[in-house]
Amino acid sequence: MPDNSYKKSYVIPGRDVPAMDAKFIRDSLAIALISLLKNDGKIIDFSSGVVRSGLANADFAVGNATAQNWVTPALTANTVATYINNALVNNKYAGFYGVCSIANPACASLRFAVGSTGGATRGRYQLQQLYAELQSVGYFPDPIIYAPTETVFVEVVPTATVAAGEALPMLVLIAEPKGPFVS
């Protein structure tokens, strides 16, 4: 039996994750992110930091700045599209722990990488199983964590053309010093 130290890159349908386990996934990630922030010297102590939900446009330059909605750019069937390509500011850590799917989604898969050209792949996820199993939420068994100043690069592969883009909400936490978003 493996020792469970291998990298896991698949989606767990929401129905397979009881509510307390989903809370544990989110809370464990929050603790990991705030600890990284403190260990990196970005905050003095835990009480000077905050963990919050990631905002689509404010944190990742995705979607509409007012609505903060998670919407892909226009999609062309069977053509890779860049969904997120944005560097984190110097005092933020980001941790992606899942994705939400809509009914009959065009996006078949996601690839998380680092760098403005999508260099090293940190995770690759097939999303069609969520639709096939009629699940609107999928969790990643291992979160994808980005450090300050790293470029978050996420690609989608659609199976259909969607001129207006498609809603594809991310489950992501941000750890940062208290200040502009939460004081």
Image (spheres, rainbow, N blue to C red):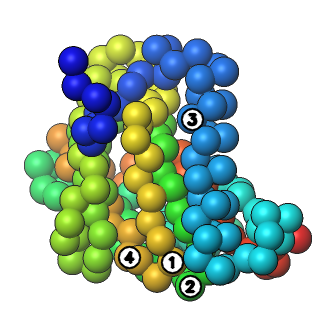
Q: Residue at x 45, y 33 (%)?
A: 139
Label 4: few (<14), some or many (≥20) within 10 Å? many
Where does the image place residue 136, in percent across and percent down from the top left? 48, 27
Residue 165 rendering spot, x and y as whole percentages:
37, 55
**Amino acid under disc 1:** Pro
Query: Would you say the residues marked 3 and 4 are in contact, meaning their CB atoms lie under 8 Å apart?
Result: no
Q: Amino acid at mark 4?
A: Thr
- Tell me if label 1 and label 3 are in contact, CB under 8 Å: no
Q: Position of residue 152 (x, y in %)?
A: 39, 69
Q: CA distance from mark 1 to mark 4?
A: 9 Å
- Residue type at mark 3 is Ile
Mark 4 or mark 2: name the one nearer the start of the chain: 2
Q: Which residue is mark 2?
A: 90
Residue 148 badge: 1
Query: At x 13% / y 56%, what residue is drawn?
Result: 79
Residue assigned mark 4: 151
Nearer the N terminus, badge 3 or badge 4? 3
Badge 3 density bin: few <14, some 14–19, many ≥20, Cα 10 Å: some
Tags 1 and 4 in contact by the CB under 8 Å rule? no
Please tell me whether mark 3 or mark 4 is closer to you in this view: 3
Disc 1, disc 2: CB below 8 Å?
yes
